[in-house]
Amino acid sequence: MLIGVISDTHDNIGSVERAVKVFNEWGVSLVVHCGDWCAPFTLVKFKDLRCKLVGVFGNVDGERELLRRRARELKFEVEGEFLHLVLNGRSIAVYHGVYEDIVRALAKCGEYDIVLRGHTHRAEVQKLGNCIVVNPGEACGYLTGRRTVAIVNLETLDVRIIEL
């Protein structure tokens, strides 16, 4: 099972449209957004996904109630700052990543196989204990100049960072 991971879209509509195309081309079964959507209109640009979308809020997501409502209208799930998923036998924590201590605690607590996070705008895959921490980087490209997402294979735990 492949899942797509995206974070820090920051209203970059072109990047969201490109990410949707990449996720559809890869045939992912689920897309996980790790926060910092910004405005609710960004959610609408995910409507062409051929799979379900779930996500969490980031530190710049101010209009949370409208984001929740828009997500529900589109049949997406965006409700809070933390999400626990069990997919393909893997336990997955999703958290934007504002506090590095929390990211490390989630990875080292022994409850999760994978922690999906964003916030730093840097694409990175690291192993902490028995857990893989995946940051897809920034989809918007505003800070690093790189627009990236990740594809995670839940069977092999291989992670691929994809340039948009």
Image: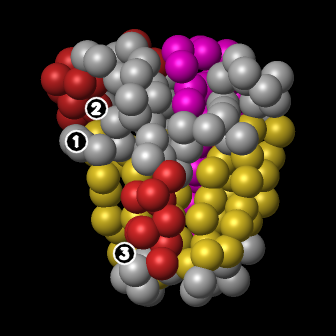
What is the distance, in whole Å, between disc 2 and disc 3 at their CAs?
21 Å
Q: What colouring method underlies this structural image?
A: secondary structure
- Which span of residues is magenta-colored? 1-21
Give the answer, above or below, for where 27 lies relative to 15: below
Distance (Cα) linking label 2 and label 1: 9 Å
Q: Is residue 97 left or right of residue 4?
A: left
Q: Amino acid at mark 2?
A: Ala
Earlier along the polypeptide chain: callout 1 or callout 3? 1
Task: Give the residue at mark 1.
Answer: 79
Q: Are marks 2 and 1 in contact (CB under 8 Å)?
A: yes
How busy is the neighbourhood of tag 1: few (under 14 within 10 Å), some, or many (20 plus)?
A: some
As rendered, which of 27 and 125 lies closer to the eye? 125
Give the answer, above or below, for where 130 lies relative to 154: below
The residue at 21%/19% (across/down) is: 66
- In percent of the image, x 40 and y 34: which residue is there? 58
Query: If you read the primary sequence from the N terminus, does the residue marked by circle 2 or circle 1 appear first?
Result: 2
Q: Give the Cα distance between marks 1 and 3.
A: 17 Å
Residue topped by disc 2: 71
In percent of width and height, residue 78 lies at 29, 40
Give residue 145's position: percent from left, percent from top: 82, 23
Which residue bears the numbered disc 3? 86
| Dot 2: element | helix
Residue 31 is at least partly visible in this image = no
Residue 41 found in image quarter: top left
First of labels 2, 3 by sequence position? 2
Residue at left offset 60%, top offset 65%: 133
Circle 2 crowding by C-alpha within 10 Å: few under 14, some 14–19, many from 20 = many
Please state, as top left, top right, bottom left or bottom right, where the C terminus lies in the image: top right
Q: Is residue 14 magenta?
A: yes
Q: Which mark is residue 91?
A: none
Q: Quadrant of the N terminus?
A: bottom right
